[in-house]
Image: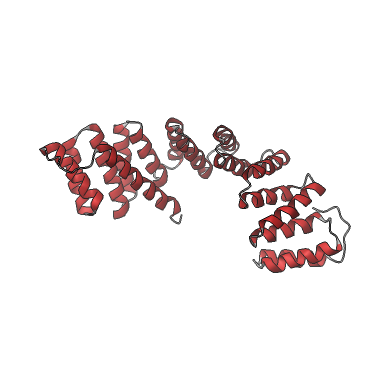
Amino acid sequence: MSTSPVKPSDDVYQRGLTFFRAGNYARARASADEALAADPKNVSYLILRGMSLIELDQTDEAIEALQQATRIAPDEVDAWRHLAVALMTAGELNEAVDAFRSLLHLRPNSVPVMVDLGNVLFMLGRVEEAIHMMEQACRAQPGDLQILRNLADIYASASRPERALATTAEILELRPDDVLANCDAAWLFLQMERYDEAANTFRHLRKIDAEQEHELYAVHGLIMTEIKRRNWRRALDLAIEATRLDRYEFTTTLLAFISGRLFGKTGGEVNEKELMARFEGEHREHRRGVAEAPA
């Protein structure tokens, strides 16, 4: 990476790199500092220093070292990559975007850089740019489940359920029993008032995610679908079934609400909007648990 002449301190640098790979970041930084004392403009040493400082949560110093590296060697990919990470870590997102764009200019076909840039743009609320970048990543690496999930999440967060559903459908085409994608699809169908498809997807989710806690979520989804369809008898049957899985508040509240609609007992019940808000909370919690579960 460096154009500096080989010096005895290169042995120090290699030792520092070994420390870094072993997770001993303090010793790695010390080795980088020792190497820089002999060759202060060596880009490799500056990058090692920056990498170590990032891991030591000393991001201001890391940024300084890595910015110096990019000034000395503006075409050095590793310098821009680690600078972008340091800027993200420090919360300097606009500057991180600039660093990622410089990196993408040097590596225009790098899908990981496209994804990182798209995510930072979305964090900044630059939704159109984020979508454009993530779509570019999907075209460059078709069928990548993580990128598709990322794009679907951005579409959903940007209130574009049709595009979120279309992207989720791509995941399901590849993996029909993907629990997370089925969870997302069922929720999107429910939001979009496509109740037959919502019911079918919640039923499928119940088959492929049969643990009691997860099954209960699917049954609650089916209940909410039938409530939306005003199919009170079917909703009641499902609510009774849900009480066999648990008798916690939301299940009993659903049962009371449906019974009120069928038998005219309306005193003190929640309204449908409140039920939907509570199910949305359950959906988010369930989805988070599925996403964070070990593969």
Q: Give whichever of 233, 282 is nearer the camera.
A: 282
In the rendered structure, the answer to whether residue 88 lies left or right of residue 162 reads right
Picture residue at 32% right of the left edge, 31% below the top: 193
145 over 166 or under it: above or below? below
Q: How many marks?
A: 0
Above-or-below relation of 104 to 37 = above
Residue 258 locus on image (x, y percent): 18, 40
Asked which quadrant contains residue 133, the reply is top right
Considering depth in this image, is 262 or 58 the residue closer to the camera?
Answer: 58
Residue furthest to the front = 268
Colour logic? secondary structure
The residue drawn where x is 21% and y is 47% is 253
Q: Is residue 72 left or right of residue 95?
A: right
Q: Quadrant of residue 186?
A: top left
Residue 233 in the image: state x and y as whole percent.
15, 37
Residue 243 vertical placement versus 121 (above, below): below
Residue 129 location in percent, x, y? 59, 33
The residue under the point 65% across, 45% down is 96
Q: Whole-percent x and y of residue 154?
A: 50, 38
Horizontal side of residue 53 vs 246, given as left or right: right
